[in-house]
Image (tube, rainbow, N blue to C red):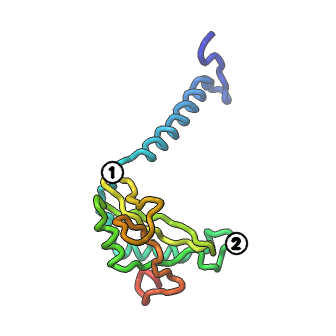
Amino acid sequence: MALFPRERSHDDAKIPYYYAVFFKIITSSCHFIKSFFMNTIKTLPTNDHLISLQHAVDMTARYRLNKEAILATEYRDKNILPTSETFNRSAIEKLLSEKDCAAIRIYYGMDETERSHAILVGVNASNEDILPSSTNTLSGSDEVILEEGQRCPDICPEKSPLNS
């Protein structure tokens, strides 16, 4: 008994059944391999993250133009998605001064009114979040989590090429 005994035909050309089976196995494996490596990467990005002003203007304009349209109708015009959030320098410096902090990661969370907020945490050289213990209160910890940014809207910066 052959491993791939059947053949399927399409018009005049015969396509061996095993090609379809092989394609299915490879496709499934690729999804597994991609998700495995994407979830286990332990290095930080090596790029410098710099973009031109024009690229930033284009991206922020596209975001402002589409941010309501991507929401389901019942969530539109409720300021769910901010245009920007501003954090004090001292808070960012505290985050960067954490022991072993090599980067900053931005998570997006949602408050009780369903408005999204940026949540900033330090990241070590192994690409792991630097977090306080779950029992730690806000006082006296070297590990910090930032939120409570100045959210626009409601409190927006002066007009600039990135917000108008």
Position of residue 100 relative to residue 157, above or below, is: above
Q: Which residue is mark 1?
A: 126
Residue drawn where x is 66% and y is 24% of the image: 8
In the rendered image, residue 46, in percent from the top left (x then y), is placed at: 29, 56
Q: Secondary structure at mark 1?
A: loop
Q: Nearer the viewer, residue 87 or 159?
A: 87
Crowding at dot 1, Cα within 10 Å, few <14 / some 14-19 / many 20+, comes out as few
Question: Label 2 to label 1, Cα distance in Å?
Answer: 41 Å
Residue drawn where x is 49% and y is 87% of the image: 155
Q: Amino acid at mark 1?
A: Ser
In the rendered image, residue 51, in percent from the top left (x then y), is placed at: 34, 69
Q: Which mark is residue 47?
A: none
Left or right, residue 16 beside residue 139: right
Q: Nearer the viewer, residue 62 or 109?
A: 109
Residue drawn where x is 48% and y is 70% of the image: 118
Q: Nearer the viewer, residue 30 or 103?
A: 103
Q: Secondary structure at mark 2?
A: helix
Position of residue 149 relative to residue 28, above or below, is: below
Q: Amino acid at mark 2?
A: Thr
Q: Which residue is mark 2?
A: 73
Quadrant of the rendered structure where residue 103 is?
bottom left
Residue drawn where x is 36% and y is 63% of the image: 122
* First of labels 2, 1 by sequence position: 2
Position of residue 46 relative to residue 148, above or below, is: above
